[in-house]
Image (spheres, coloured by chain):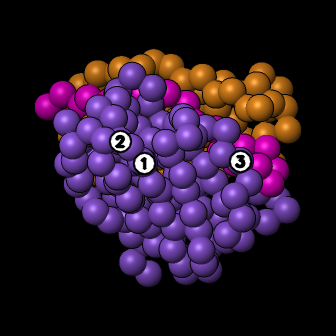
Chain colours: A orange, B purple
Amino acid sequence: GENVEQHPSTLSVQEGDSAVIKCTYSDSASNYFPWYKQELGKGPQLIIDIRSNVGEKKDQRIAVTLNKTAKHFSLHITETQPEDSAVYFCAASPAGYKLSFGAGTTVTVRA
Amino acid sequence: DAGVIQSPRHEVTEMGQEVTLRCKPISGHNSLFWYRQTMMRGLELLIYFNNNVPIDDSGMPEDRFSAKMPNASFSTLKIQPSEPRDSAVYFCASSTRTGQGYYGYTFGSGTRLTVV
């Protein structure tokens, strides 16, 4: 099955700086890569996703890049704000199959 | 849409008691997933259903755990008897499954279970 590794496990950034989280996956058949944000006491919420026919996708301060050859994808958050503090999960799935999640990255934005 | 609805939000029970967690998926979604989240093990997939049929229950820790989906709008996860090591946050998620994959994967707010 698919195995997703996520780094770093914790990330502390100064407000206004950028944050980058990286994930690698093992199954070359994976074609869907979502990112989730989980705030304290809540369930994970989808923030952005990308499919294998696209190399980059951006939504305001959030962007995701995908390198299918190297089997890795990354989440970029620019101009970080205190409300960006949360746990972020990457995930991957082959067509028609369930999502496999990374272990999560705890992001802390320092004011 | 109200999203994925889970109940109860919090459950405290004594060891040995039966616990039932409930989930109402998003209307129109044909797949439902039960996850367990702990600090040590992160998000673990316990079981998932497509069109109310269990597809993969390999993540269910042991026979004390069982899950049902009697119809498209309701699922339960039961633990009998419960043990302190079952303490965790249990999430339900639903999505639409097509031949191309799972879309609209949405989580509920979770049930925090504490077994004392």
Residue A74 lies within the magenta run: no
- Secondary structure at badge 3 equals strand
- Secondary structure at badge 1 equals strand
The structure residue drawn at horizontal position 84% and vertical position 32%, both measured from the top left corner, is A28
Residue A22 position, x and y percent, is: 55, 25
In front of the other: label 2 or label 3?
2
Residue identifier under label 1: B79
- Circle nearer the N terminus (2, 3): 3
The structure residue drawn at horizontal position 18% and vertical position 28%, both measured from the top left corner, is A110
* Location of residue A105 by image quarter: top left
Residue B46 position, x and y percent, is: 56, 43
- Chain of the residue where label 2 is placed in the rendered structure: B
> Dots 1 and 3: beta carbons under 8 Å?
no
Circle 1 packing at 10 Å, graded few (<14), some (14-19), many (20+), is many
CA separation, marks 1 and 3?
18 Å
Q: In which quarter of the image is the C terminus of chain B?
A: top left
Q: In the image, what residue type sits under mark 1? A: Ile
Left or right, residue A4 beside residue A38: right
Question: Over which residues does the magenta segment extend?
Answer: A93-111
> Dots 2 and 3: beta carbons under 8 Å?
no
> Dots 1 and 2: beta carbons under 8 Å?
yes
- Secondary structure at badge 2 equals loop
| Residue B11 sits above or below residue A17 on the image | below
Give the camera-side residue of A19 and A10: A10
Residue B82 is marked as 2
Residue A52 visible? The answer is: no
- Chain of the residue where label 1 is placed in the rendered structure: B
Q: In which quarter of the image is the N terminus of chain B?
A: bottom left
* Location of residue B7 by image quarter: bottom left
Residue identifier under label 3: B56
CA separation, marks 2 and 3?
22 Å
